[in-house]
């Protein structure tokens, strides 16, 4: 084993993992080996779980939002029970017992954080972005959310009510962003292409039709 | 203990050693019950291989801080205000 990483602390210590392996990865590997050895899980179930997780993407959440934009009755059902609404489109909202969709309007803006860890509607949005799990986002989203939004490029009018949802427990939150101007003639699929991951976390507005066309 | 929508509640300020889902920055804070999400197994015991029973009711609670913060807090962390 090598000890060739740079770090600022000044003590010597024993190598802390396989070559190139982070302490967190080493801990996860040790846990997995123990759980397999004790028959709690199998290698196959771990592989299937990882495959399922990385197969999810924001495209599923975007389908829900686009449907809500074109179908007001679906939007009502989505806001009442996102799990049931997702099932209507053949989507599995994941293992959390409650998935709650919240709507951004002219008067109210929602953004989502998990201050305790990285709770996130993975089944509908895929794995969370690195910044969502970072300590600065997790702490500043509740202490100075308007500044955080401004850094993401969202300038809210002072009279817009800002609601920060801290997903501390069993519930996962999905933001239904505002439908952009100038999208009246667009199809549901075209609309879904405007719905970005970050807009469903509430730290961005959806793409404009012009920006989406330029991509 | 059960709470009603609109009821004012205080988050218990007690310390808790071990896994729990009540954020430190909200302990001792007063908020308003927005809704009940239903009852779920208790993460504080489930995290240690137990059943998590009896289930605890989980509330969405609103806190005002210039902006609004909504957080999910289990019933045994809430006190009537």
Image (tube, coloured by chain):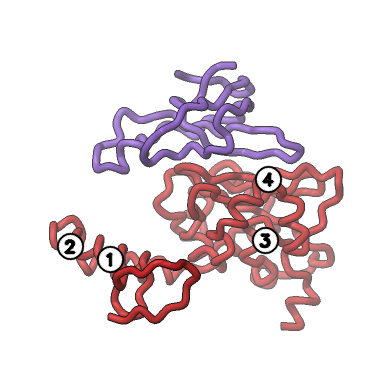
Dot 1 and dot 2 within a common chain: yes
Query: Marks 3 and 4, how far apart in space?
Result: 20 Å
Query: Marks 1 and 3, how far apart in space?
Result: 31 Å
Chain B: give its colour.
purple
Judge left or right: residue B1 versus residue B32. Answer: left
User: Disc 4 or disc 1, which is closer to the eye?
Assistant: 4
**Residue at the location (70% across, 38% down)?**
B68
Q: Chain ID for label 1? A: A
Residue pointed to by mark 2? A36
Which is more N-terminal, label 3 or label 1?
A: 1
Residue pointed to by mark 4? A143
x, y percent for residue A185: 79, 68
Viewer-closest of A140 and A129: A140
Residue pointed to by mark 3? A199
Which is more N-terminal, label 4 or label 3?
A: 4
Query: Marks 4 and 2, how far apart in space?
Result: 41 Å
**Residue at the location (36% across, 71% down)?**
A51
The local crowd at label 4, few if under 14, some if 14 to 19, many if 20 or more residues have their Cα within 10 Å, is some
Residue pointed to by mark 1? A46
The local crowd at label 2, few if under 14, some if 14 to 19, many if 20 or more residues have their Cα within 10 Å, is some
Query: Marks 1 and 2, how far apart in space?
Result: 10 Å
Contact, CB < 8 Å: mark 1 with mark 2?
yes
């Amino acid at each position: 084993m090598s000890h060739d990483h740079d770090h600022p602390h000044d003590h010597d210590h024993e190598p802390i993992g396989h070559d190139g392996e982070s302490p967190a990865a080493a801990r996860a590997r040790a846990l997995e080996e123990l759980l397999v050895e004790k028959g709690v899980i199998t290698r196959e179930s771990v592989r299937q779980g990882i495959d399922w997780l990385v197969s999810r993407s924001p495209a599923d959440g975007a389908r829900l939002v686009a449907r809500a934009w074109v179908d007001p009755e679906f939007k009502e059902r989505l806001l009442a029970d996102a799990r049931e609404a997702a099932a209507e489109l053949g989507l599995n909202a994941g293992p959390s017992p409650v998935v709650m969709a919240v709507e951004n309007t002219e008067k109210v803006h929602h953004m989502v954080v998990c201050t305790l860890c990285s709770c996130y509607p993975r089944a509908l949005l895929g794995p969370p972005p690195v910044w969502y799990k970072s300590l600065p986002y997790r702490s500043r989203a509740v202490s100075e959310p308007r500044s955080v939004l401004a850094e993401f490029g969202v300038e809210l009018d002072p009279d817009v009510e800002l609601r920060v949802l801290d997903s501390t427990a069993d519930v996962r939150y999905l933001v239904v962003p505002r439908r952009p101007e100038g999208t009246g003639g667009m199809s549901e699929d075209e609309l879904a292409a405007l719905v970005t991951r970050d807009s469903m976390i509430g730290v961005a507005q959806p793409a404009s039709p012009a920006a989406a066309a330029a991509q | 203990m059960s709470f009603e929508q609109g009821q004012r509640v205080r988050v218990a300020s007690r310390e808790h050693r071990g896994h729990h889902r009540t954020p430190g920055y909200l302990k001792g804070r007063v908020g308003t019950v927005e809704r009940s999400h239903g009852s779920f197994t208790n993460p504080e015991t489930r995290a240690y291989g137990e059943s998590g029973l009896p289930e605890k009711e989980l509330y969405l609670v609103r806190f005002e801080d210039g902006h609004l913060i909504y957080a999910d807090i289990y019933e045994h962390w809430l006190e009537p205000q």
